[in-house]
Image (cartoon, rainbow, N blue to C red):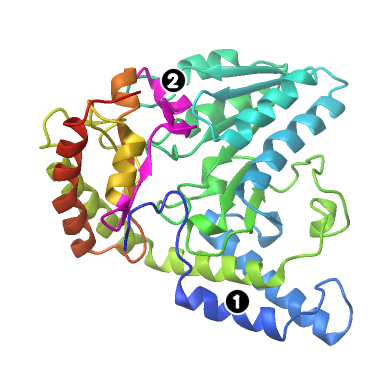
Amino acid sequence: MIYLDHNATTPVRPEVFDAMLPWLRDGYGNPSSVYALGQRARAAVEKAREQVAALVGAAEASEIIFTSCGSEADVLGVGGGAWQARDESGGKRRKIVTTRLEHDALRLLGSQLRRRGFEIFEAACGRDGVTDAADLASAVDEQTAVVSVMHANNETGVFQPVAAAAAAARRAGALIHVDAVQSAGKEELDAKAMEVDTLAISGHKLNAPKGVGALYVRRGVRLSPVVTGHQERGRRGGTENTASIVALGAACELARRDLSAARAHALALRRRIEAAALKIPGALLNGEPDDRLPNTSHLSFPGLDGHALVVALDLEGICVSSGPACSSGASTPSHVLTAMGVPTEAATASIRVSTGWGTTDADADRFLAALPGAVARLRAVPSSL
C-alpha cells in the first residue's frame, strides 16, 4: 500500500508507540492520585506538556491544555473564548470573525453560536485560497469576542494571514485563535512570537495516536470550560489520558527534532509529484503555488469524478483523498473550493495528495506511474453525475 493521505491521519511512529506502551500496561495510575503510582503518571504527563510546549513555542509548559483531539481544542479556544468574553463584557462582545475556509468543527460551532445570539463574520478569500486580510480586519471591532484563523488550510495547504488577524484582534481587544492542526510538525510554530492567544494541535496529524490533542493558551487568557472538572487546572475536566498524552509528547519531540529534514524531503516530493501530475492534459493545481505546506498538493482533473479517481487509485493500492465531500455517491464541491471560486467541473474532479513520515521516492514514482492511466480511463467513461 502507498499511503499519500497524511493530512487525513498519520501512522504512529515506532518510537511513539514504544513511549506509549508502558503507560497502557503498567503505568495505569490516575495522575491526580497522591500515591507513587499516580505521581509517576503525573510526572509523565508534565514531561509531555513540556514537549508540546517546545514544539508550539509556548513561553511556559503550563500554557498547554491536553484535549481529546484537535476539534475539541478548536472548540475550547473559540467557543470557550467567546463565552468568556461575552460574560466578562456584560454581553457586549458577541461577534466571531473568522474565514470561509475553517475546519468543519469550527464551522458547526459557528452555527451553534449564531443560534445563541452571536454574530459570525466569515472573511472572503481569493482563487489562490488565501483569506482576504483586509476583509477580515475590517470586520473586527469592539464587539468582537474572538478572531479565528487557520494557520494552513487542511485541503490546499495554503497558509493564511495569521499575523494580520492577530494584529486586528489586538487592536480591538479581542482574542485570537489559530487552528494549527494541519501545520504542527510540518512547519515551525512559535505561538509567543505569533502573539496568539490560543492555538490548537492534534496528535494523529503528527504521528501520534488518534484521540489526543492540545490547546496552547497564553498565560492570563481565560476560557469558559467546555468539559468541566478539576483537571488541567480547571480548564478541561476529565482524567488525563496518560498513555496518549505521553505519545503526543514523544511525537512532538520527534517532529521538532526532524522538522528541517522532513520539510526539505516533503518539499522535494511535492515538487516532483506536481511537475509530473500537471503534465496530464487539463490538470490544475488548486491554491497558492508556493506559500503552503510542503507536503500538500491539491489537484483537479476536469472531465472525471474525484471520488471515482480515489477509488481507482485505491484499487491499485494507493491512498489519496477526494477534494469534494461525497454523499450518497454524488460529489459536491467542498466549502473550501467553493469559497475559492473553483469552477464546479474542476472542484468535483479533485484529489488531495499529502505526504509524510515514511513516504519515499518510490512511493511517489508508483503514484505517478498509476495516475495518468487512471485519469485517462475515467475520462473515457461518460459520467452519470
Residue 106: where, in percent of width, then height?
A: 62, 33
Which quadrant, please, contains the C terminus? top left
Q: Report the front residue among 329 and 350.
A: 329
Residue 208, above or below 147: below
CA neighbours of label 2 inside 10 A, class few (<14), some (14 to 19), many (20+) = some
Residue 167: where, in percent of width, then height?
A: 55, 28
239 horizontally vs 186: left or right: right
CA neighbours of label 1 inside 10 A, class few (<14), some (14 to 19), many (20+) = many
Residue 163: where, in percent of width, then height?
A: 49, 33
Q: Report the front residue among 277 and 106.
A: 277
Residue 78, above or below 135: below
Q: Report the front residue among 97 and 88.
A: 97
Q: Which residues are magenta?
A: 314-342
SS class of the residue under badge 2?
A: helix
The residue that label 2 is drawn on is 339
The residue that label 1 is drawn on is 20
Q: Are marks 1 and 2 in contact (CB under 8 Å)?
A: no
Q: Quadrant of residue 358?
A: bottom left
Q: Report the front residue among 169 and 271.
A: 271
- Which residue type does callout 2 highlight? Ala
- Which residue type does callout 1 highlight? Met
